[in-house]
Amino acid sequence: MNALDILPLDVAGVVILLWLAFGLFGLALHRTPQLITRIIFPLGALGALALAGTGLWALDAAPDVAVLPLGLPDLPLHLRLDPLAAFFLILLGGASFGVSLFSAGYFRSMAGNTLGLLCLEYHVFLASMALVLLADDAYMFMVAWETMALSSYFLVTTDHHVPDIRKAGFLYLLVAHVGAIGILLSFGVIQGGHGIGAYTFAAMREAHLSAFWSSIAFLLALFGFGAKAGVLPLHVWLPEAHPAAPSPISALMSGVMLKTAIYGILRVTFDLLGTQLWWWGVLALALGLITAVFGVMFAAVQGDMKRLLAYSSIENIGLLLVGIGLTIIFHAYGKDALAALSLTAALYHSLNHAFFKSLLFIGTGSILHATGERNMGRLGGLIRKMPWAAALMLIGVLSISGLPPFNGFVSEWLLLQAFLLSPGLPNSYINMLIPVAAAVIALAAALAAYVMVKFYGIIFLGQHREKALEHAHDAGTWERTGLGWLALGCVALGLAPVFVIRQLDPVTQMLVGQGLGNSTSNWLFLAPVDVERASYSPVYFLLAVLGVMLVTLLAVRHFYHGRLRRGPAWDCGFPAQTARMQDTAEGFGQPIRRIFEPFFKIESELPSAFDTHPRYHGRSDDRIWFALYLPVKHITEKLSSWVSLLQHGRIHLYLTYTFATLLVLLAFV
Amino acid sequence: MMAMDQTLGILFQLCQSLLVVMLAPLLMGWVGQCRAWLQNRSGPGLLQPYRSLRKLFHKDAVLAHNASPLFRATPYILFGCMWLAAAIIPIIAVDLPFSPAADVIALVGVFALARVFISLAAMDIGTAFGSLGARREMLVSFLAEPALLMVFFTSSLISHSTQLPHIVDTFAHHEFVLYPSLAFAGLAFVIVLLAENARIPVDNPSTHLELTMVHEAMILEYSARHLALVEWASSLKLLAYISIGIALFLPHGIAEVGNWGALPLAIAALLTKLALAGAGLALLETFLAKMRIFRVPEFLGTAFLLAVLGLLIHFLLGA
């Protein structure tokens, strides 16, 4: 084979093998932790970058198939790199490049043994996510999917000596497996009992299911992938697992792993199932809306910064699901141009979320390192101690709040445009539903800004709430590089939407048969339909605001002066200002708790006016946990206690059971 | 001819930008003067805002010891955003070359960007009032912003565009129909205007009681040129909002594309509308009382529901 014959799939395979090798090297090098952080993680990062490049290369290329001589006898493993997989490879590579660079600095003080193991799990996790995207048969997919779940479980429980973390890990593992059952069943339904050869995706594409069975397959897939993505009511593991995991791991799980679930939904719905029914879209849309509003509402009342981000991830998954739902509706009614628009919005938002959520999660890692504190009520004023981390995370905060000219705004803009174009649908009920849905999206987006002002303001601004914060240090060079890469991604994705959308064209072509990219000739103006209809130019926007700012600054200096004095804060002349007088995280979220009171299970304990040691205690819990999960748990416990009646641990009893079973069987024969 | 048109367009864009930035304090002065008349006071005169700005620019800025660069940059960002917003709304003629850079959704984004920055700046010093103001501002906005977006949606659905010039062109020159959906949207818009510009009944721009403040609480720590820019930006925001109201609901009289002869008439029409809107605002503020902060979500919730209702009516009646 000469050099020209190398295909993207080969490069991707090499990167995956390299990752596995790096992981093993890491395990072997556990006596020299410096080597792991200084060499293995940066090399892994380069692999991620190569993978992203491969994805970019494979977007335009024809789908590329390979059959591996691995697996069970007569069940070889299939790999395929098509535009959809390529797009998610770019997402995986782009986000994990930054996270791996950050990890090189973040894990530097970890003990060698733990670090070696973590390095292995980390790279196996990355490799398994890549394999999930490349898998072309149900067997390969499930193996990769389970490897991903298990490696991330071990990563979450890195600090396994803390009981709460073990508990969080168990919950995650449980939900992941319940979801995996759904996915497996879904594949089983699509395969439709066509024998052992029909487990490849290629065979599934040929299986023409009846409307009933394809609906069953869709619902199972939505359930299975929804459990991984955190769609309501299967979201409970996210706010537990993310705070438990080390920050780079949270970043990967939230930024990238959740997207593999989105990939799965897209793969099953648009690729494996030939036709889509409109009510699937309505279901996905409704679930997405509920998830989005629920997530952002709960994010607003959190006091732990990583829990807050976890709930915000739930919100974003909701938005993605809304985009997918709209795509299904449009595609089912044959409006492929509109389907392409909403699918572009969903894909774009996946990419954006991978960047800004990874950025924010690793940023919380830097804060944790600097202060040892996850509770926002004990932080504050860090912008003066950690200027780099603060500046880079500000970009993430502005992006996730959906503000122009950053990337979050572009995908939100595209999604809203898709809603505005909906009135052409033949179903009048859906036409009525869609404006309400648009209103809910707008509400969720506005609440997201509230949440992010709280997040940034409480952590970085104001006065230090604790004395110890005086000694906080800024993020190190590696950490800054990782943060910087992801921040750069947020800015670039915000400023060059036309370029990105052009790259997305092959994916939408593949899934809904139409693209958007050709409709825009001018790379400065994003105009998905036509310029008369709607347009947005982030570059001009940024230049105008910066230009006006500069002119204003110069004019003020020229006509007046730039004199400045420093003094104590005024605060209307109130003396004795203390840091305790600032809003706490609970205080900032209080209006939301009050407005949306019925949705929370609130427990609070207020001191009376005469308490000598006044103590305030408040908790806002998730009602779904109590209404759904606890009853299920009780029933499971009940059932297992009945089953355990059979179990006494004495061998002669078990032999009796065996004998009785044989007797019963004999009666049938 | 094309190049000529383009130069003219850019020239016109520059003129409008300068006009709005110079006119905005006058609008503030006019509203204040109307309020004074309605309340049987003589009032400070129309030019008072200019005098205040001049005074503030001359003073030395005093900054808290712990103020971060974010705090110092915010007035400029705020001013830039509001100026941009006011400059791209078609108020005199519909062909503004810069308008395609930001449609109505982006316009909502510009307001949100400015709001997030001023809220963050309010929390920067770490005073009790600052974070109180920031929290209330975000509370007001998370209901007002979607309402504004829904108002825009209604007009976009009617005109099949999210470009403001296109919307205005449709309403002003092509169709003379009364839209019931727009009536609801208009009502919602007035509420949003009151809330977003910190007017009574949501906030009181002239209050001296810190505990009832929203906007004023956020900018307590600003002084001199920073405060001047924040105040100027507030007046630009009021002008921008009233311009949006005029553009969406009363665009008649605006000059058509390329019709430069209609400009004098358009400017006269605009000034009259602005004066009427300012007087109306003063009248509303005189009649209403400020409400408790926890009544505000209900008030804004009403706006949100009205806007959604407008949208639904559009879908139901197709108008």
Image (tube, helix red, strand yellow):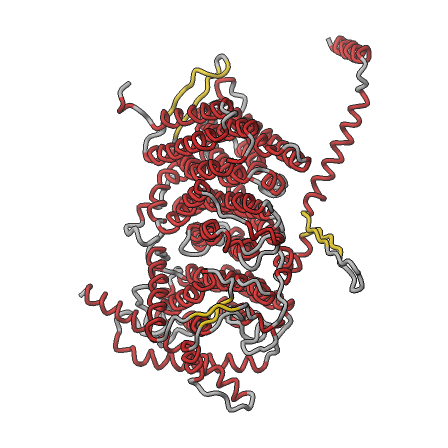
Q: Residue furthest left?
A: B1
Residue A448 x %, y %: 53, 54
Residue B259 x %, y %: 26, 73
Q: Is residue B313 visible?
A: no
Depth order, front residue of A243/A135 = A243
Classify residue A423 by image quadrant: bottom left
Depth order, front residue of A32/A322 = A32
Lateral position of residue B37 relative to residue A517, left or right: right
Classify residue A235 by image quadrant: top right
Residue A163 x %, y %: 68, 35
Residue B107 x %, y %: 42, 62
A267 versus B271 height, above or below: above
Q: Residue at x 26, y 24 (%)?
A: A4
Q: How many numbered marks are there?
A: 0
**Placement of the N terminus of chain A among the 4 image quadrants:** top left
Q: Is residue A193 visible?
A: yes
**Placement of the C terminus of chain A among the 4 image quadrants:** top right
